[in-house]
Structures are given as structure tokens and as C-alpha cells.
């Protein structure tokens, strides 16, 4: 769907997801998208990157962009100051709670394969037995036993199932442990558990407050169900053409795909 963006949003806050939204294949940002964001900033808009990736998996993208703003990472658990290279805010996931949630899920559907993102700006992503990494360009450390995943503080748990697809795994996990943790689908083969109350909206609201901007003057871009809370928080939500149907159903507008510079198309319309 497409309709007119309220005039008040034109010089406020732009929130962009990364994978499947701003980034193209190979973690690249096109020259067109880069220029469109630069033009928007020059017109007075502020840009916040909002990603499910934790800080260690996103810093190379920020560096390539020359990005010096705030980035919401780890599915909303982290607010990172790219200019200073430091965390302004971070929420750890209770590891005992994570184990309880996993036990309940496995009691329902059998064994799941598990990975975790550790807490901190230089932390590692640990991959448990059976878990398949679908982003080979991201650094990971494979461990021999699931118990090794809990050696250090974490900010989220990632799940895969040998038979269930992403939508079904998400549905079952929410039904079983949705009252204990936040369950979201962040991408293909990426179903995640976060601390209760943590999602992209909570992280974006915190980062926007630092900048003195509210959701009533924000436009958000995304492609997956984990962007639904961000769309609910922002005044205007733009789904990519390649977006999951769940996000498209709540979007105010649908633009072109990430590979076709869908973000740039919208920003060029708004900022010239």
C-alpha cells in the first residue's frame, strides 16, 4: 500500500533495519542509498540503525558507512554510540531463564539447535551442536556442548529446528514460552529469544529519547516480523517489497526491495 506521508515527518527521525532492508548482498550499502541518507541528514533528519545483530556483528557495517550516530543492536537490547565505540545501554538475558525456556520448547517439539550472542562490544557468537550459520561472513565460535553456551553473559538466544520452518517454530515457541521471554523471527532461519520486554521498539524508544525525538515524528524501514514493534512505535512504517507478509500487513507503505534501493526511493521522494 502507498499513501501520503505526513508533512511533520519529513525532518525528524529515520530508523532503518539492516539485513534485507538497508543492506544488499555481502553487507553492502549502495551509493544511492548512502546519498539519500546523507541528503536526509542534511535536511535535518536524524538516522538510527536498528538491527537484530549484536554490536560485534554490526561494527564493520557502521565503519563502512562512516556512521557516527546511535545504533540499536541485539534486537533492542543494546544502544551503541558508534562515534565513541561504547554501549550507552545494554540488557543481559538471564541464562537460567533461557535454559528453562529451551526446556519447555523441547518438551513440546523435541530437540532444537541453539546459538547465543554474548554480551559486550567485543563479545562472541557461540554456536551449539547442530546449529547452522546462514551468514558465513559473521564471526562465530562453535562449542562442543550446549552447556558451554552459558559460560558468559548473553543478550539473546537463537533457535533452529531440524524440521519445523521459521513461522511454525516461532508460533510454537510463543505459545509455550511467550509469557517468559520475547520470541521473534528476525530473518530466514533466525528465530530468537530475548529478555521479556525487549524488542526493537523498546531499544529505538530509548535511543530516540537520547536525541530528543519521539515516535510521532519517526519513519521506520524493515522487512521481517521483528520489525513489527518498531512499526507500531513509529508514526510511519515502510516495508520492503521482499518483506515477510506479517510485516507487510501492518505497514503504512511498501517500497521496492533492498536490492532495488527501496529506502532511497522513499527518502528521495521526501527529501529531494
Image (tube, grey):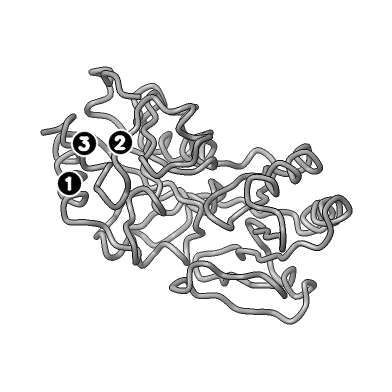
Residue 85 sits in which quadrant?
bottom left
> Which residue is depicted at the point 60% across and 63% down?
119
Mark 2 surroundings: few (<14), some (14-19) or many (≥20) residues within 10 A: many
Q: Give the position of the N terminus as an image quadrant.
A: top left
What element does badge 2 sit on?
loop
Residue 17: image location, x then y, percent: 40, 46
Which residue is label 2 attached to? 255
What element does badge 1 sit on?
helix
Q: Nearer the viewer, residue 230 or 133?
A: 133
> Which residue is depicted at the point 79% across and 43% down?
177
Residue 164: image location, x then y, percent: 70, 54
Residue 144 sits in which quadrant?
bottom right
In the rendered view, tell whether residue 226 sits above or below residue 120. Answer: above
Name the side, left or right, on which 272 lies relative to 111. left
Name the side, left or right, on which 23 lies relative to 161. left
Q: Which mark is residue 38?
A: 1
Name the side, left or right, on which 196 lies relative to 54. right
Nearest to N terminus: mark 2 or mark 1:
1
> Which residue is depicted at the point 44% across and 60% down?
86
Q: CA distance from mark 2 to mark 1?
A: 19 Å
Mark 1 surroundings: few (<14), some (14-19) or many (≥20) residues within 10 A: some
Whether label 2 touches label 1, CB < 8 Å: no
Furthest residue toward right: 107
Residue 181: image location, x then y, percent: 73, 44
- Front tag of 3 and 1: 3
Q: Give the position of the C terminus as an image quadrant.
A: top left
Which residue is label 3 attached to? 267
Mark 3 surroundings: few (<14), some (14-19) or many (≥20) residues within 10 A: some
In the rendered view, tell whether residue 232 sits above or below residue 51. Answer: above
What element does badge 3 sit on?
helix
Nearest to N terminus: mark 3 or mark 2:
2
- Front tag of 3 and 2: 2
Amino acid at each position: 500500500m502507498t499513501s501520503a506521508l505526513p508533512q511533520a515527518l519529513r525532518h525528524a527521525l529515520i530508523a532503518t533495519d539492516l539485513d534485507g532492508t538497508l543492506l544488499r548482498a555481502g553487507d553492502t550499502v549502495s551509493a544511492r542509498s548512502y546519498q539519500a541518507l546523507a541528503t536526509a541528514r542534511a535536511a535535518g533528519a536524524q538516522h538510527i540503525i536498528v538491527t537484530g545483530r549484536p554490536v560485534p556483528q554490526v561494527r564493520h557495517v557502521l565503519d563502512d558507512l562512516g556512521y557516527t550516530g546511535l545504533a540499536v543492536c541485539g534486537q533492542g537490547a543494546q544502544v551503541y554510540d558508534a562515534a565513541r565505540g561504547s554501549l550507552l545501554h545494554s540488557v543481559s538475558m538471564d541464562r537460567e531463564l533461557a535454559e528453562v525456556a529451551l526446556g519447555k520448547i523441547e518438551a513440546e517439539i523435541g530437540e532444537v539447535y541453539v546459538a547465543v550472542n554474548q554480551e559486550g562490544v567485543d563479545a562472541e557468537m557461540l554456536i551449539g551442536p547442530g546449529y547452522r550459520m546462514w551468514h558465513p561472513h559473521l564471526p562465530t565460535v562453535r562449542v562442543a556442548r550446549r552447556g558451554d553456551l552459558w559460560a558468559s553473559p548473553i543478550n539473546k538466544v537463537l533457535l533452529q529446528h531440524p524440521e519445523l520452518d521459521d513461522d511454525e517454530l516461532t508460533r510454537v515457541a510463543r505459545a509455550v514460552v511467550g509469557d517468559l521471554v520475547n520470541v521473534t523471527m528476525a530473518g530466514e532461519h533466525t528465530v530468537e529469544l530475548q529478555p521479556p520486554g525487549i524488542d526493537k521498539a523498546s531499544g529505538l524508544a530509548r535511543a530516540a529519547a537520547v536525541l530528543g525525538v519521539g515516535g510521532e515524528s519517526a519513519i521506520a524501514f524493515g522487512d521481517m516480523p521483528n520489525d513489527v514493534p518498531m512499526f507500531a512505535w513509529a508514526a510511519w512504517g515502510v516495508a520492503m517489497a521482499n518483506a515477510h507478509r506479517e510485516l507487510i500487513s501492518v505497514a503504512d507503505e511498501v517500497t521496492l526491495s533492498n536490492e532495488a534501493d527501496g529506502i532511497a526511493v522513499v527518502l528521495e521522494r521526501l527529501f529531494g
